[in-house]
Image (cartoon, helix red, strand yellow):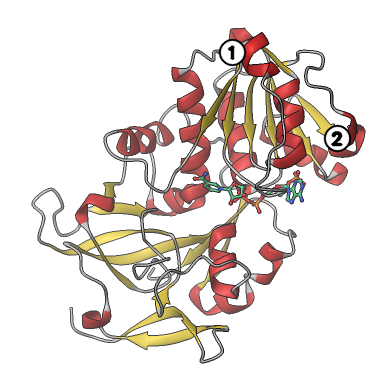
Amino acid sequence: MNAPFKAFLINQDESRKIASSLTTMMPDQLDRGEVLIRVHYSSINYKDALAATGAGKIIRRFPCVGGIDLAGEVVESADPRFRVGDPVIATSFDIGVAHHGGYAEYARIPSEWVVHLPEGLDLFEAMALGTAGFTAALGIARMEVNGLTPDNGPVIVTGATGGVGGLAIDMLSQLGYHVVALTGKASEAEYLKMLGADEIKLRSEIDFDKVRPLEAAQWAGAVDNVGGQILHWVLATMKQAGTVASIGNAASFNIATTVFPFILRGVSLLGVDSGYIGFPLRQQVWERLGRDLKPRHLAAVTRTIGLDELPGAFDAFIRGEIKGRTVVRIGV
Ligand SMILES: NC(=O)c1ccc[n+]([C@@H]2O[C@H](COP(=O)([O-])OP(=O)(O)OC[C@H]3O[C@@H](n4cnc5c(N)ncnc54)[C@H](OP(=O)(O)O)[C@@H]3O)[C@@H](O)[C@H]2O)c1
């Protein structure tokens, strides 16, 4: 392959202001890697919006093709585990932040970052899930290893209308959990119920300034996408031996809490890092996403845009106006 292709490149001007735009690249401008992939789809995660707009210091190497997620077919490979024509997924690691990412018709990726497309998913579905779905599934897998089962009691999901939150609700519901969605958006109650939430709890019902170290014990599990005072409240309301997956910081990266949930109720706070989780767990989680963790409502939570629409797509993420997932159609 030696022809020009379209790419969305994130750059910095002399005053260190982010300037991103659609451009044309040649294959020899791509980074090093064993696998050249013709990208079919990418997606937009909150992190992509921070990177493309400069609202967050995400990019570690300029210029960089954005897009932390990609799915496509192998067109060249120097690693025998991947053959020409194989459908593959590549997310996480340095992709889209320090290594040219998924917002381009071609991507060259180190083979140790590439996952074979699992049975049960097509390339579009893989990107409807993307990092958000992978992270929700990884959080659930971590909680299961820590002993969480549907018999232990309800599981609460915070940041419920977000990409990770909505997919976590769908996955937990089909595994048989009683799922409680915590949201700031009363208007999205029906959407959350459609995804599988058994109960909706509004943030406005809770006085987060008056949370005691231990409150009435309610949850066997929790998927927390927001951090801050909400995570403190979640910890204070966990049942004995409850397990919390800490995924995000949509509200705050700070957490002020006490040791009481840990030493008096045996609560576990599990860290979830999708970015650098290695193999074989990475492949195993993707395989479950094509099987028992495959969301039932993936189409309903997903909208699709073209590569040309990317430049105008990010601001709504920064303003918190997006619901569900956005797939970017690249080379199909
Ligand atoms: N650990 C990892 O590997 C990993 C991977 C992916 C994402 N993340 C992080 O996980 C979080 C969720 O990601 P996402 O893709 O689902 O983001 P998203 O689609 O932007 O959703 C975030 C949701 O959080 C809630 N929220 C937003 N601002 C809030 C605030 N100030 N206070 C309380 N709640 C607020 C909103 O839901 P409601 O209105 O329904 O509450 C919003 O829809 C982000 O912080 C992201 O950076 C981490």
Using residue 156 as the reference point, say whether residue 48 is left or right of it.
left
Q: Which residue is mark 1?
A: 150
* Residue 155 in sight from this viewpoint: yes
In-front residue for pair 292/99: 99
Using residue 315 as the reference point, say whether residue 99 is left or right of it.
left
* Residue 294 in sight from this viewpoint: no
Q: Quadrant of the N terminus?
A: bottom left
Rendered residue at 20%/54% (across/down)? 111
Q: Quadrant of the C terminus?
A: bottom left
Q: CA distance from mark 2 to mark 1?
A: 27 Å
Up-down relation of residue 131 to residue 306 (above or below): above
Up-down relation of residue 22 to residue 61 (above or below): below
In-front residue for pair 79/239: 239
How busy is the neighbourhood of tag 1: few (under 14 within 10 Å), some, or many (20 plus)? some
Rendered residue at 77%/38% (across/down)? 229
Rendered residue at 75%/15% (across/down)? 218
Using residue 310 as the reference point, say whether residue 233 is left or right of it.
right
On the image, the x and y values in percent for residue 219 come to 70, 18
Disc 1 marks a residue whose amino acid type is Pro
Q: Which mark is residue 208?
A: 2
Q: How many marks?
A: 2
